[in-house]
Image (cartoon, rainbow, N blue to C red):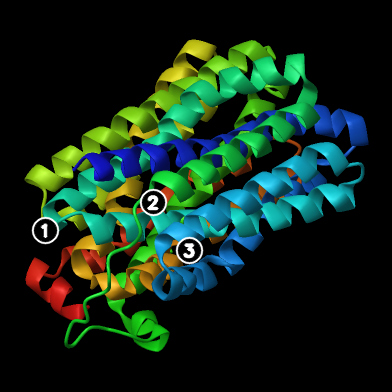
Amino acid sequence: MKSRSLMIFLLFVGYVVVYIDKTVMGFALLPIEREFNLQPEQLGYITGIFFLAYSLFQIPAGWLNDRFGYKKVLALSLCLLGGFALCFGVLGFSLGLLVTFRFLSGIGHSGYPSSCAKAVVSNFAVEKRTFAQSILLSSAGLAMTAGPLIAVFALDSVGWRGSFSILGLMAFVIAAAIIVFVPNPPAAQPRSGAVTGYRDLLKNPIVLLLFVSIFCINIPSYGLMAWLPKYLVQQRGMSLDVSGMVVATGGLGIWISSLATGWLVGRYMQGNEPKVIFCCALLSALCIWLVYTSTSAVTAGLFLFLGYIFLMAAFVTVFTLPMKRLPSEVMGAAMGIINTGGTLGGFVAPIAMGYLITVSHGYLSTFVFLALAMVVAGLAILPLAMKPRATLRDAA
């Protein structure tokens, strides 16, 4: 039990660094825009290319987990993330280099979520997996609560280059700790009748529907992360400090929702997860739209907090559902496929928003885009709500 607790703690800290890397970028776009005189669509490329690499390497990373074990992939992911974050800060002297280093950093990020999921499935009983995974996912809340405040301070103190350099060094330290302290994966125990091929997984209705749903959920998740600070500063006239506080309220909502959802769904909503996803997705869509209509930092922060409460509830439920429905020996591959949908959402969102802002000269169309994405996320999961739990399990 002690070794599992230490493992969860180290994976949590690693997840915090992973999410802070994404969070800081939203604030770093402001000084990067000034330094290189970039247009909104060019800024979208810097953020979007990261998620393209993240998406392309999700499935290979899942295969590496199933083939070589989660510990090796965890350490490799953090080393790649740290190395290219360091390069981004130290060597990023042109748009081409910035885009290249963010692409390579996305490769590093790609192995971390599926490795953590594999670690949870390999070390925890089915009834404890939702809460264990929700602890890890709550790192997004900590990163988005503390991240904006850290980002504003770091950007003022050491600039965007120094901020990414420090982040890279932190990733190296955590990778070393995981190598030393995280236990080696237990030997795999074959199960008769288990799905073993990617072709079978790609035909699995659970995998396909969760792929679509998490793709849509991550459009507002990463779209807001990339563009909300810029929107609050340039369209609502807030200072960078105030915008950081508003974004931090959303992070607080993520943190609370991650832990609460893991406990509530794991304890009271077993078998009803699709209904939870549908309801939370629609409520999140409403709150995202209300963020746009808000004219003060207080109301924007309140609706962002509520929006992320419901968004993260949907995300955690989507992300942990395959842990209950699919066999552990293909968990790395399955999570790689499903999380590819999520990272594709992260790729599409900032680039699409950049073009929408350029074409419309405003943010109305972007918030409509984000809210509609959450509506589609809820609708995509409805076919699973029509089937009993046993049928879902049998589909695996």
Left or right of residue 232: residue 101: right
Residue 53's place in the image compared with 231, above or below, is below
Residue 299 picture location, percent across and down: 45, 16
Q: Nearer the viewer, mark 3 or mark 2?
A: 3
Q: Which amino acid type is shown beneath numbered disc 3?
A: Gly
State the residue at coordinates (68%, 12%): 239
Which residue is tagged 3? Answer: 341
Q: In the orientation shown, which residue stands out farthest toward the front?
A: 180
Mark 3 or mark 1, which has the lower sequence index? Answer: 1
Residues at marks 3 and 2, CA–CA distance in whole angstroms: 16 Å
Which quarter shows the N terminus? top left
Say few, some or many: other residues with alpha carbon within 10 Å of mark 2 (under 14 / 14 to 19 / 20 or more).
Answer: many
Q: Mark 2 points at which residue?
A: 375
Query: Which quarter of the rendered picture does the C terminus lie within?
Result: bottom left
The reply, left or right, for residue 350 in relation to residue 199 is right
Q: How crowded is mark 1: few (under 14 residues within 10 Å), some or many (20 or more)?
A: some
* Within-10-Å neighbours for mark 3: few <14, some 14–19, many 20+: many
The amino acid marked with disc number 2 is Val
Above or below, comparing residue 323 to residue 249 in the picture: below
Look at the picture and state if 69 lies above or below 147.
below
Mark 3–mark 2 contact, CB under 8 Å?
no
> Residue 9 appears at what percent x and percent y?
35, 37
Marks 3 and 1, Cα distance to the nearest angstrom? Answer: 23 Å
Q: Does residue 237 appear anywhere in the picture?
A: no
Q: Where is residue 288 drawn, in percent x and y?
A: 46, 35
Left or right relative to 105: residue 196: left
**Residues tagged 3 and 1 counted as in contact (Cβ below 8 A):** no
* Residue visible at 14% across and 47% down in the picture: 266
Point 71% across, 34% down: residue: 164
Q: In which quarter of the image is residue 212?
A: bottom left
Callout 3: helix, strand or loop?
Answer: helix
Callout 1: SS: loop
